[in-house]
Image (cartoon, rainbow, N blue to C red):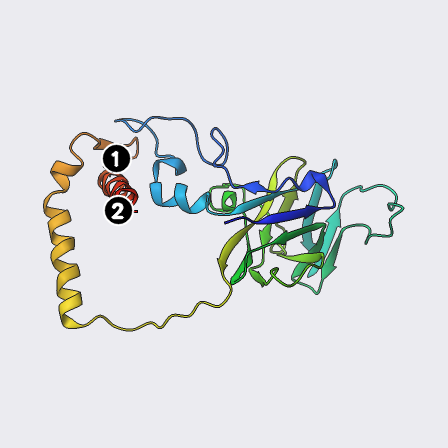
Amino acid sequence: MQVKYRLLNPGLRPRRTKLEMPGWGGAPAPRKDGSHEQPWHCLLFSEGAQYGIEIFYPHDNELRVTKTGGKVELTGDFGPPPADGLQWPPFRSFGDNFYTYQLLLDLKVPAGWALRAEPHPRLYTDPTDTVPIAVPALLRTEWWPMISFVVFKAPPEGGTHIFRPGEPMMQFILVPADPEFELEAMTADEAADREVRSRRIHASRSTLGADSTWTSSTNTVFDGTYRYLSRAAKEKSRGSS
């Protein structure tokens, strides 16, 4: 499968999201006794964080977004308007609780797929609460070639969101355009089978995770049972394909 792009601003640098380490993915501390737990230690987060297409802030000057007296304030120097007539500055307030950015990027997805705008995953590991928050939106770019704008949620009163040159500001997730599924309760037999499987994993955890168990500096015990089973499931899938 391919997602093709048409780029009007090279600084946006769309790419598959990468877990930066050191950086928002954590420090390169090994999984061993005494280490402080890091975001990348969690396979579920690592795989989820790298699932999308990250988009970088393309401008040379920092932008700070604040809210004062209930109004969004955008502070940054973007220079004179470009000669091509594009919206300038590229950011503008959108009501009292949001602001927008004109995204000079066209991503074409295959038939039956769409793109969902999301906050960049570094939002969830940032201790400063300054990472921009892109508002979820579904773009059906199979047939929509237009340049779109992205909506961001404004920070609370007194808070600040910061766009820095070279930092990712949001991401897109490739999803089915129309999720055709129904949510229903398991039958008694299905639920019983899942319970048996769950108990078997629990009973064998001391064996499966024997060589990967460690205690962090906060006295939290971790093991690699999920990683082991995930790797086994992927190998089984490759062998049957």
Q: Residue at x 55, y 60 (%)?
A: 136
Residue type, label 1: Asn
* 57 relative to 175, above or below: above
Residue type highlighted by circle 2: Ser
Q: Are marks 2 and 1 in contact (CB under 8 Å)?
A: no
| Neighbour tally class for label 1: few under 14, some 14-19, many 20 plus, Cα within 10 Å | few
- Tell me residue 224's x, y (percent): 24, 37
Tell me if residue 69 can be seen.
Answer: no
Label 2 crowd (10 A; few <14 / some 14-19 / many >=20): few
Q: Position of residue 18 (x, y in %)?
A: 50, 37
Query: Is residue 17 or residue 237 the one in the foreground?
Result: 237
Q: Position of residue 16 (x, y in %)?
A: 53, 41
What is the secondary structure assignment of the residue under circle 1? loop
* Residue drawn 10% across the image and 46% down it: 203
Asked if residue 85 can be seen in this view, the reply is yes
Question: What secondary structure is found at the residue carrying circle 2?
Answer: helix
The residue closer to the viewer here, 217 or 23, is 23
Residue under label 1: 219
Residue bearing the label numbered 2: 240
In percent of the image, x 64 and y 47: which residue is there?
5
